[in-house]
Structures are given as structure tokens and as C-alpha cells.
Image (cartoon, rainbow, N blue to C red):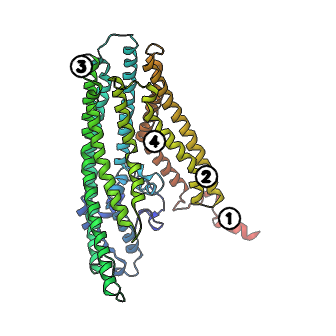
Amino acid sequence: MTYGDDASERTLNGEGRGSTDTVGLYTALGVERDATPDELKRAYRRLALQHHPDRNLGRTHSSSEFVRIQLAYDVLSDARRRRIYNRYGEIGVQMAGRMGGELLDPLVSSVLCTLALASACIAVLLIVFFAMLARRVDGGVEWPFAVVFAPLWAADLVVGVVLVWARIKGRVFENSEASDSDDASEIGEDEAGVDGGATDATPLLSGQSAPQQHQQQRRASRRQRLRNARKCAEAQVAKVATAAPAAYLLLVVAFQVALVLRLDNHVTWSALLVATPWLVLESIHFIQLTLQLTAGALYIREQATHGEHTFKRILILAANTFWWLAIRVSLVLLVTAKLDGRISWSWIFVFAPTYVPCVWWAIALCFLPQQLRSMSSDSEMRQNATVIVRTCVAAFGVVASVVYSFVALLAWRLSQPWAVRLALVFVPVFAVLVLACCCCSCFSLCMACGIDATVEIMAEREHQAAPSSTNVVPPARRIDQHSYASLGST
């Protein structure tokens, strides 16, 4: 039984409405709020045996008490719903089953709120950095670049703190989900015992000949080897993904330090040598993407039927996996080659790799209406598809105009240093960062205050909509003995 079912919409007080009480479920099981999962399980088993309907035939109270105990244990035995109940009560658990209910989880909401607040701080620091950089390059001040990059290093510090905090939160979340997985594994073992130890291998038909059975066994063995290899690749991807963020941050800081040393003329390194930490970062990302591609290719081969050609699907997967990496690496190599004087191209052509995403997404938008219409023949769905296409085209136009106006201004500034001020080049950047700062600040404020207010409003509405358990007739409308006699005389 799940708490979101129709039968479980009844609350413990039997009135059919939620409340913000956060102790009623614990009281129903007779445990404290800090009870461990084992204590909850023992209390539930003891009370369930005591009030089971088979042991209390004809006793309505025991039956309703048994339902109360089941509902209480169903919520408190789940780590996520227990967190929601501890924060918002029964009404929060009921709302968690609806769209957007994941935000009611205090762990999820705290993570999103912290990330939004950190993103707003990073956006402010980047605005300050680009303003100081424009001021320095345009000749307004003579600060060393080590001072100009101070806000950027502060942003790196914020990112580092967020990574450490996310790692700690991830461990807390894994520990909170461990009890649920243990219970699920116990149930799975029981079900496996009931099934008689059935395996995933393809069953052999008695009517098959010996060569057919041998061929089927080879296919099952091959599929099992592919599954084991895929799981191994996925485990390696998880390990790399765990260590990659810290390595990325350290390499970005190393690149910034090398750039500052070169700009302040403390070293005479070439642009390619300055960009070496960034290329090492892309190499680590290449390894991570290669492992992901390996896992995806093994999954495609594992799910393929006999005789199906998978080369084309794997090739498409490889293109979708590596195209962003290829664009970034080619852009870095072209920019460093231009700065070191190895090529004499115009900056418009040096930034050519940035034009590829625009062409890619423009082609995808051209085929999007046909793909959406092929998904459904319903007229209403086709109208929705038209709205989706128009929205995507509008969003693509806005993003492309902002990005490529910045690229054009930057190419102009690098080609003719005194033709345009760097502050004007950074106008699109300032606009995006200000918008991001406002959105992240509003989102963090809504996550911090809006959810509690929404739950309280929903609880009040549920309370007003629910019928009263005792309907008392007002004294002016009561029929007493005198009123009954007067009615009889008429």
C-alpha cells in the first residue's frame, strides 16, 4: 500500500483531510521522532499483529487501527516521505505525490536553494570580474592582472565550497536511502526464492533441436558477457565522474594562474603552453566521454536482436557524444595558433568552430515539426507541437543573437583594438549574467519561503473544504416541544 493511493488519502484522524501535524504518525506507532528504521519495523510488526483483522473479527475499531498503523509505517519507512512528513506533516506527504512534489523533500529543496544562491553569488563575482577586466584593458586603470582576476578566484572558491558541500550531502543522501535499499533487497530475495531461482537466461524450448539449443545458449552467454562488460564500464564512469569535478576546478585555476603570469609579463610562455591546463582538462573529459560511449555501445549491442546491424546507431551515438568536445578543442587550438602567430587568419575565421552549434541546432529545428507530428496523429497534439516548435525557434533566436553578437564584437575588438571598447564587447555578457543573477536569487527565495507558504495554504484549503464531523443545529432553528405543538395545531 502506498500513501498516495485513494485508500490512503484518509488521514489518521479519519476526517479525509491532511494536516500539518508532524507527530501523529509517530504516535500511531508508539515511537519517538528520532526512531531508527529497525525500531519502526519492530513497532509496526507488534501493532500489526495485535490489531490484524483476522485476529479481531467483528471489531471495527481494530480494523481502523490496523489501517492507521499501515499508513503510518508506509510513510515513515520511506526515507524521502519521512523527511517530507517531518517538515510539512500529512498534507506535505499528500502533495508529494503530485506534479512537482519532489521539491517538498527538504533534502532536495535545500540542495536546489543552495545551488541557486551559490549561482547568484558566482554571477555577481563574474560581473565584477568582467567590469574590472574591461576597465583594465581599456586603459582606465593600471592594476596588475592578479588584482583584476581576484573576483574570478573568489568565484572558484565558491565553486570549491559547493563541491565539498555537495559531496557531504551526497553521502548523507546515500546513507538515508540505505535502509530502503536493504528492505527492498530482502523483499527481492524472498521473491527470488519464490520464483525458484529463475535466471535471466533465455529459456530453452523442448521442441528445439540440439544445434538450435546450442545456438540459443551461445546467444544468452554472449548477452550476459555484454551485460557484465557494460556494468564494468558504468562503474568506471561513476568513479571518473566522482573525481572529475575537483580535477576540473584545479585545472581551471591552474589555467587562470598561468594566464595571469603571462599577462603580467612574469613569464614568456607561448599561448599554447598557457592553455596546457585547459587541454589536460579536455583530455580528462575525453576519457570520461569514451567510457560513456563504451557503456552505451555495449548496451546497444546487448539489446540488439540477432542479425541487427548496430554500427550506424553506435556511430550516431559517438557523434552526439564527442561533437561538443571537438568544437572546444578546435577553438582552443585555433586561438592559441593565432596568438602565437602560427596562422594569419582573420578572427572571424578563427572563431569558426563556434558557428557549428548554430548550424547544428538550425538543422535540428527544421526537422523538429516532422518528428513531433509523426509522434501522434491527434489534432490537439499537432497544435501543441506547433506551439513547441514556435517556442524553440524563439528561444534559439534569442540565444543565437546574444551569443553571436558577443562573438562578432570580440572579433572586431581583436582585429581593431581601438575601434571599440571592451566594455561594449561585454554588454551581452553583462546582460546574461544579470538575468542569471536575478533568476537564481528569485528561485532561492521561492525555495526558502514559498514552499512553506504553499503547504500552509493547501492545508487551510483542505481544512475548509472538509465537512465538519459534528453538525450542530443553531438554537434559532431547533424544534422544541412548544414549537412542535404549535405546528400540530395548525
Name the residue nearer the viewer: 448 or 472: 448
Left or right position of 252 against 467: left
Which SS class for mark 1?
A: helix
**Label 2's element?**
helix
Q: Residue at x 43, y 44 (%)?
A: 452
Q: Closer to the observer: label 1 or label 2? A: 2
* Residue 327 against residue 127 in the figure, above or below: below
Mark 2 Cα shell of 10 Å, populated few (<14), some (14-19), many (≥20): some
Q: Which residue is mark 2?
A: 384
Q: Which residue is mark 1?
A: 483
- From mark 4 to mark 1, how far is it between C-alphas? 54 Å
Q: Are marks 2 and 3 in contact (CB under 8 Å)?
A: no
Disc marking residue 268: 3
Q: Secondary structure at mark 3?
A: loop
Depth check: give the residue in front, 293 or 345.
345
**Quadrant assignment for the N terminus:** bottom left
Q: What amino acid type is highlighted by mark number 3?
A: Thr
Residue position for label 4: 450
Distance of label 2 from label 4 (alpha carbons): 30 Å
Q: Residue furthest right?
A: 490
Side of 224 relative to 320 (left or right) = left
Front-most of residues 329 and 116: 329
> Disc 3 vs disc 1: Cβ atoms closer than 8 Å?
no
The image quarter in which residue 410 lies:
top left
